Image (cartoon, rainbow, N blue to C red):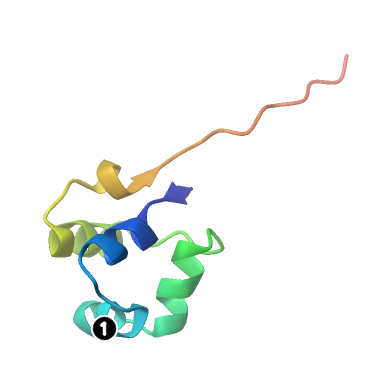
Amino acid sequence: MKNKLKVYRAIHSITQEELAEKLNVTRQTIISIENGKYDPSLRLAFKIAAFFGVKIEDIFFYEEKEKTFIT
């Protein structure tokens, strides 16, 4: 899942550590989400969106990879 978390953090001038504290998660969780290595739970995605005052789909979006079909 792709996301714009880093962009929203920059807009609000908040560090990864500060955001992690506000959401009660580790900085590593924020780093992993931003790098696309971890998809947050639905609960955490809602918390992130609420923190920034936006809808979940403003921050997170699914980008399907091309499927390769063997015939």
Left or right of 37 in this view: 42: left
* Figure quadrant of the C terminus: top right
Q: Write down the quadrant of residue 50 in the picture.
A: bottom left
Pinpoint residue 37: horizontal percent, then vertical percent: 56, 63
Pinpoint residue 12: horizontal percent, then vertical percent: 20, 66
Please report the residue visible at 47 percent of the width from the left and 81 percent of the height from the top. Answer: 28
Please report the residue visible at 24 percent of the width from the left and 60 percent of the height from the top. Answer: 11
Number of disc labels: 1
Label 1, on which residue? 18
Left or right of 16 in this view: 58: left
- Furthest residue toward right: 71
Secondary structure state at the residue bearing disc 1: helix
- Image: 44 above or below 30: above
Q: Amino acid at mark 1?
A: Glu
Pinpoint residue 56: horizontal percent, then vertical percent: 25, 48
Q: Write down the quadrant of residue 52 in the picture.
A: bottom left
- Image: 66 above or below 33: above
- Image: 35 above or below 13: above
Please report the residue visible at 15 percent of the width from the left and 65 percent of the height from the top. Answer: 51
Left or right of 40 in this view: 46: left
